[in-house]
Image (spheres, rainbow, N blue to C red):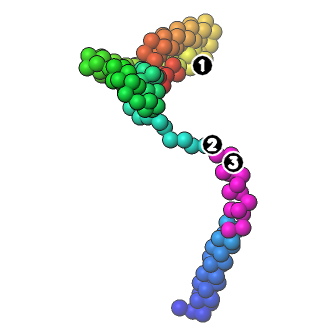
Amino acid sequence: MSTAKTTLLIGARKVQISSAALAIASAAAITPVIAPAISQAAPAVTAAPVLTWGFDQLDSALIAADNDNNGPAAAAAAVAAYPTPVELLQYLVQGIARGLELVIGTPVYTAVAFTGGLFTFAGDLLPGPLGDFFVSIGTTVDNVANTIAQALRVGPYATTG
């Protein structure tokens, strides 16, 4: 290897090492200044008092009794408030039904909304009354898609609860 290439490689290594050292020094100098501002801006994180398994229909009195641990009376009330096996089966069926609504409803809503968009797009391209007719069809199909989404709680009408 020639001395010019060797000198160039050594120079490149020195630039890399200098850049890394500058980055480390900058981080070390700026961290004490930024860290208090970040810790004050960050929301306080608290541990969840009880695991609800993502089910929103659990009785809040049951959760409060479980969390308070107020002795045998609270424990007896909590046991009385637990769902029965029939209720658990009902919750399971409701969960499966909601899952099917999402799995089937979302593609149906998407396909119908896409079709309405295509009609509206075609109507925007076509001139005169023919274009207005296609825009009208597209709007009607979009309204049907929104009705489907509202009924099945999918798409823009999906809820977390």
Q: Which residue is mark 1?
A: 125
For residue 141, above or below residue 39? above
Q: Position of residue 115 (x, y in %)?
A: 47, 18
Residue at the spot 46% in from the left edge and 22% down from the top edge: 60
Return the mark for residue 96: none
Return the mark for residue 43: 2
Q: Are marks 3 and 2 in contact (CB under 8 Å)?
A: no
Q: Is residue 22 left or right of residue 59?
A: right
Residue at the spot 71% in from the left edge and 62% down from the top edge: 32
Q: CA distance from mark 3 to mark 1?
A: 54 Å
Please tell me which residue lies in front, 1 or 54. 54
Please tell me which residue lies in front, 99 or 111. 99
The type of residue carrying mark 2 is Pro
For residue 28, above or below residue 13? above
Q: Is residue 138 left or right of residue 53?
A: right
Q: Position of residue 21 (x, y in %)?
A: 65, 75
Q: Which residues are magenta?
A: 28-43
Q: Is residue 24 magenta?
A: no
Q: Quadrant of residue 29?
A: bottom right
Q: Quadrant of residue 59?
A: top left
Q: Position of residue 26 (x, y in %)?
A: 70, 68
For residue 4, above or below residue 141? below
The type of residue carrying mark 3 is Gln
Is residue 85 something that shows in the picture?
A: yes
Q: Main secondary structure of the magenta part?
A: helix
Q: Marks 3 and 1: which is nearer the front?
A: 3
Q: Which residue is mark 3?
A: 40
Query: First in sequence: mark 1 or mark 2?
Result: 2
